[in-house]
Amino acid sequence: MSEGLLEVTDLRVDFRQPGQLVRAVDGLTYSVARAQTVAVIGESGSGKTVSSRAIMGLLPPTAKVTGSIRFDDLEMVGLEEKAMRGQRGCGVAMVFQDPTRSLNPTMRIGAQIREAIQTHEKASRGAAHDRALELLELVRLPAAKERLEQYPHQLSGGMRQRVMIAIALAASPKLLIADEATTALDVTTQAQIMELLRDLQGRLGMALIMISHDLGLAASFADEVVVMYAGRAVERAPTRTLFSHVRMPYTRALLDAIPRLESASHAPLAAVPGQPPNMALREPGCPFTPRCPNSTDKCRSHAPPFEEHELGHLWACWHPCEDGVRL
Amino acid sequence: MSAGGPLLDVRNLVQEFEVRAQGGVRSGVVQAVSDVSFTLAKGETLGLVGETGSGKSTLARAILQAPRPKSGEVLFEGTDLVKLKGRDLLRARRQMQMVFQDPFGSLDPKWSVARIVEEPLIAFRTAARAERRRRVTEVLDRVGLDPERYANRRPRSLSGGQAQRVAIARALALDPALIIYDEAVSSLDVLIRAQVLNLLERLRAELSLTYLFIAHDLALVKQVSDRVAVMYLGKLVEIGPAESLYRDPLHPYTVALLASIPNPDPTASRAPVTNTIKGEPPSPIDPPSGCRFRTRCPRAQDVCGAEEPRLRRLADGHFAACHFPVSEEAPAPSAREPARLAGGTHDASAPD
């Protein structure tokens, strides 16, 4: 894509642990265009969070990152910490799952936002204060002026997440990564925060990566969806294409395992057996093989390539699902 | 045991907590559960939904008398648990078990799986050692954990789904009549969650168990429930058969909850999340007068602040506590319309 803002190519992240090597991300490739919303979907341990932290340069020194992350024509892999700091915040910013742990409990809200502002630009205290108030109003925090003087514990979970978004927006990033940003919130609050993110994105022309386990959320808000399993991208397509033409059996399994409002009570869920693979044991072949109803001997020995099989629709599977066929 | 009567009959249950002022927190009485009544028939699953702070977990604990409720009655097989003491209460409690959200937080990390599951059998001095061992093997088998492989493992070496299966096995050990699940599958991954949900359904059928299933995910609750109850700020605002409640929700809060759920099908006719209610729930220390939802309700009128709506029957087995329940015949009255007019519409919507 020519106007690609972020190009992740063959990204690998290895964690060295005593006696073993855990490959958390294994050859991930995707791109995000300007002002686009991409959802990265996967279960615990699928590598979705590790890959987004790699983009932010927030992985611990025990992590070995290879491959390429080009952001705005700048290679981020191997970038020095100082240069990375310049990118963090104004290039890419991130909102995390738990706003309680991301905020400093002993600092007033206003001071925490001012700190974010003054890290990126030379601003007087007064100017930073005005900008902080502006940001809180931007994220529609009720009674913004009073909130500046309050501490995180005086705010509800939804309000704290609004503050985190305000801090993330402090340096007008081109890309915002929301890592399970609404998972800990109640369903009505989640809807409010997602509406807010969509609105902000439209107004600020910012690209958004939603990291989530919730396909429903992805279906409602993303332009494109990347499904990850065992550190790899296994399917990627524009949202509507993905949901109406599911190809990868893993994506199919995820969709079928979600309880639907439309289905009758006590209807059994289609649940594939087994658990995700142990990432320390590298086996050849497709990692979903042991749980996949479509699998054959070929799947066990040869990993399917992640390729574009239909226009804009990529998947990694030797035996993709057909339209309308359940597992 | 009262033949034919409900297994559990909760009447006017009230639970309150006192909070003292401390660093910005207001002092007062938290009205966690306010005058909640419902019944649960044998073999039935009642889903309980509501947001954080709505009193779902407090209600569950008050039913188990841990801690004791402030007032009200909890009739279990006809016996009021609130009046029971000491050994009698213990004996009744044997019939009721609870499974919590975080399996790692509710399993002793230093104990083996077998020891964890055996613990309730020891606590209630049910049987000799050999018999207890046999029972442990039996329940582990039931929840799909191979006793040979798992009995000697510690919780740390289990996945979230396996650990939750251990918690379920522990709940089953004493052969209870009622199991309360408090967000028991909420932290599990989608595929594992589906496996555990199917397990719960199978156990219910095989062992004729009765469930109180607490969760914030409405689609999930529908999956397992015969009836569903909705709580808001300590009040039961709607209760009814699952099909009817999801198809024709009566309380504006239930409508808002349902509208907030993202649909995993972008091609579905249901519009994506737009109909969100504004703001956040008020403090349970000083709940609004009259209807507690009125401050966020798009249908609220003057009467909602003056008079508390009582839970009334509006359809077969379907109750709601609202002056202006939502129904298809009566679209939401605009804020400017007099309450009088709107008052007429709810009479028309009452079927009986």
Image (tube, coloured by chain):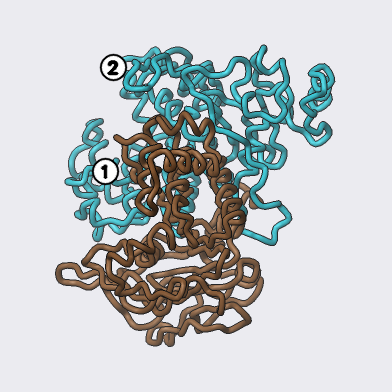
Chain colours: A brown, B cyan
Identify the residue shown where x is 35% and y is 45%.
A115
Q: Secondary structure at mark 2?
A: helix
The answer to whether mark 2 and mark 1 are in CB contact below 8 A is no
Q: Using the image, tell me which numbered label, if any, was put on residue A293.
A: none
Residue matched to label 2: B86
Identify which residue, B114 or A132, lies in the foreground.
A132
Q: Is residue B267 above or below residue B246?
A: below
Q: x and y percent of residue B265 in the render?
A: 64, 59
Location of residue A309 by image quarter: bottom right
Q: Please give the residue where the numbered disc 1 appears in the rendered image.
A: B107
Q: Position of residue A85 (x, y in %)?
A: 33, 61
Residue for point 40% across, 51% down: A96
Q: Residue at x 43, y 31 (%)?
A: B57
Number of residues whose C-alpha sits closer than 10 Å to that of mark 1, classed few (under 14), some (14–19) or many (20 or more) = many
Q: Amino acid at mark 2?
A: Gly
The amino acid marked with disc number 1 is Leu
The quadrant of the picture occupied by the C terminus of chain B is top right
Chain identifier of the residue bearing label 2 in the image: B
For marks 2 and 1, give the CA distance.
26 Å
Q: Look at the image and tell me whether residue B1 can be seen.
A: no
